[in-house]
Amino acid sequence: MFFGQLVMTISGAVSLVSVTGIVLAWNPLVAVLILISPILPVVVGQIFAKRSWLIERERAPQRRRGQYLLALVTNDKTYKETRLLGLVPHFIAVYHAMQDRFLQVDRRVEAKRGIGSVVSGLVGVVVTALAIMFAIQDAFVLGDVGRLAACISAGATVTSAAQMLMGGVGQPFEHTLFLGNLFEFLDLVAHDRPSAHPRLSAPVTDRSTVVFDDVTFRYPGQDSVALSHFSASFAPGCTVALVGANGAGKSTIVKLLARLYEPTSALDAQAEEAVFDQLRGQSAALKILISHRFSTVRMADEIVVLSQGQVIERGDHGSLLDAGGVYAQMYAVQARAFGA
């Protein structure tokens, strides 16, 4: 591609110089007019190409923000939180408003580009007409009709050669504009990240107790129930751990809570403990914790043990161990596995 553009540029330059030189020897004014006619529209195009690049450069932070908002409402890992907090309509509205602003700017630029193209084209036509008029006048004065035909042919050749030259130069010019962004990025000075990050906490706007009252739930297309007459209440400010074997209904409870979830199932033990430590600092919020690691579960204020979608035990870590029920047995199995 680059070699083709290079050949086109050199060919256009050679044709332009040679033909213009011949016409210049005949009539300098006609030569200048023939040269100006095709160059003006190309120059106008390059001006608007740079303007479009500047607009896109200024939009870059907004486009990144738009992609981030789009990911928040389309990615399954973030949609749960955005839906829970009621932010999906807000994010969509912000994204649409941003696109509307882009569209308005683009329309104005394209309107000006169209006007510029029409005006430069008309100017080119007028200049070409003047060149032909002067060529006709020169031919009558000298009595050389062949020179008139040569000037008209030279005008067409110069127009084609100028377009080839400006096109060959213009495309690399546009490419270098965007390539400059890369070099500017590579020249950025790296900064070390701070060793500690401030903890952020979301304000709790609703401190009502979450109540499940005799809830029975079955997934669409499934015969068996995921929750059967499930009743439980979760007070604000408490950390509640849901414990049970796979399929006991832990995830179903969370999905029914407007798709709220704590991402500890995909974390290692140290990362899970760090997440839990941060959650404990948010004393006013209700925290629902699902984990198979009892080292984390034991720190919850209340532990709910599930089996086949029903609550079979409930209490804190100490009371459930003293009761010697299912929780105590599960805890003992895991403790033996780790040599505790």
Image: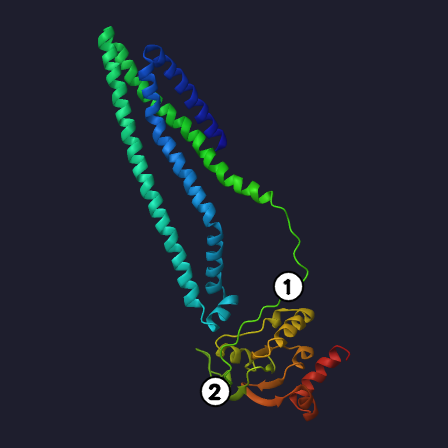
- Circle 1 residue: 197
Residue under the point 50% across and 70% down: 81
Residue at position x 40%, y 27% in the image: 164
Secondary element at image label 2: strand
Give the quadrant of residue 8: top left
Q: Residues within 10 Å of mark 2 (few under 14, many from 20)?
A: some
Please state the horizontal and vertical placement of residue 27, each as a whole percent of the image.
Answer: 32, 12
Looking at the rendered structure, which numbered label has been put on residue 12?
Answer: none
Tag 1: Cα neighbours inside 10 Å, few (<14), some, or many (≥20)?
Answer: few
Q: Position of residue 201 (x, y in %)?
A: 57, 71
Quadrant in the rendering for residue 269: bottom right
Q: In the displayed image of the protein, which residue is found farthest to the right?
A: 339
| Residue 217 drawn above or below residue 24 | below
Q: Is residue 242 left or right of residue 93?
A: right
User: Residue at (32%, 21%) from the top-left corner?
Assistant: 34
> Element type at marker 1?
loop
Task: Report the mark closest to the observer, 2 or 1.
Answer: 1
State which quadrant residue 301 falls in: bottom right
Q: Mark 2 to mark 1: distance in Å?
A: 41 Å
Give the residue displayed 51% in from the left and 66% down from the top: 78
Residue 273: image x %, image y %?
67, 73
Residue type for callout 2? Val
Q: Which mark is residue 215?
A: 2
Check disc 1 and give the amino acid type. Answer: His
Give the x, y percent position of residue 319: 67, 90
| 184 in relation to 139, above or below | below
The reply, left or right, for residue 139 in relation to residue 264 is left
